[in-house]
Image (tube, grey):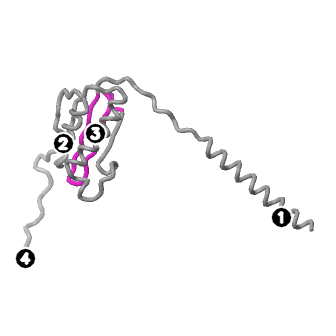
């Protein structure tokens, strides 16, 4: 009879500790986003054949908001479409506009199809675009090409 009481006491102790653990987890609070008053920034549009990534930073280079076609739920070949780039730019622009950004200088990089559409989307969001700069890396006679194919 004593053994049964000990077992029930142990099981009730285990239940009590699990409750305490659950309470500790639920007390975690998410950090509040502080609204910054930044008026001008730089928008980086990186457009590849597979994806388009838009990140908007302040003048010193700290990223305020970012988004990509993949992050907006597009998968596979739909990720590389101009529409996916438009949706991603619209999302990044909305987050930055909320922070107080109004004027942008845009730097575009890469050969992808979402370059122009991302710019149009940022402009339609209400941003004043001061300048557009193409920073696509260009090889100065680059790497040696492969040997000619023999069939």
Q: Nearer the viewer, mark 1 or mark 4?
A: 1
Of the pair 58 and 90, the residue shown nearer to us: 90
Whichever of labels 3 and 1 marks the residue nearer the N terminus, that label is 1
Magenta residue check for 102: no
**Taking the image as drawn, is residue 63 in sight?**
no
Tell me: residue 150, above or below residue 92: below
Mark 2 — residue?
117
Mark 3 — residue?
90
Quadrant of the rendered image containing residue 27: top right
Quadrant of the rendered image containing residue 76: bottom left
- The tag on residue 19 is none
What secondary structure is marked by label 3? helix
Q: Residues within 10 Å of mark 3 (few under 14, many from 20)?
A: many
Mark 4 — residue?
151
Mark 1 to mark 4 CA distance (whole Å): 79 Å
Q: Nearer the viewer, mark 2 or mark 4?
A: 2
At 24% from the left and 29% from the top, the residue drawn is: 127
> In x, y percent, where is residue 96?
33, 32
At 12% from the left and 63% from the top, the residue drawn is: 146
Whichever of labels 2 and 4 marks the residue nearer the N terminus, that label is 2
> How many labels sit on residues?
4
At 12% from the left and 57% from the top, the residue drawn is: 144
Say left or right for 32 vs 79: right
Mark 1 — residue?
7
Query: Is disc 3 in contact with disc 2, using a CB cutoff of under 8 Å?
Result: no
Mark 2 to mark 4 CA distance (whole Å): 42 Å
What secondary structure is marked by label 1? helix
Whichever of labels 1 and 2 marks the residue nearer the N terminus, that label is 1
**Taking the image as drawn, is residue 81 in sight?**
yes
The residue stretch that appears in magenta: 41-63
């Amino acid at each position: 009879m004593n053994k049964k009481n000990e077992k029930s006491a142990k099981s009730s102790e285990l239940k009590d500790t699990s409750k305490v653990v659950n309470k500790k987890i639920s007390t975690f609070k998410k950090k509040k986003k502080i609204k910054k008053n930044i008026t001008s920034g730089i928008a980086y549009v990186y457009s590849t054949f597979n994806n388009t990534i838009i990140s908007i930073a302040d003048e010193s280079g700290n990223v305020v908001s970012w988004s990509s076609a993949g992050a907006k739920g597009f998968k596979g070949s739909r990720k590389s479409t101009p529409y996916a780039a438009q949706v991603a730019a619209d999302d990044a622009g909305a987050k930055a506009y909320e922070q107080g950004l109004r004027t942008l200088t845009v730097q575009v990089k890469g050969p992808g199809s979402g370059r122009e559409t991302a710019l149009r989307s940022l402009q339609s969001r209400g941003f004043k675009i001061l300048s557009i700069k193409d920073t696509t890396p260009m090889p100065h006679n680059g790497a040696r090409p492969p040997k000619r194919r023999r069939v």
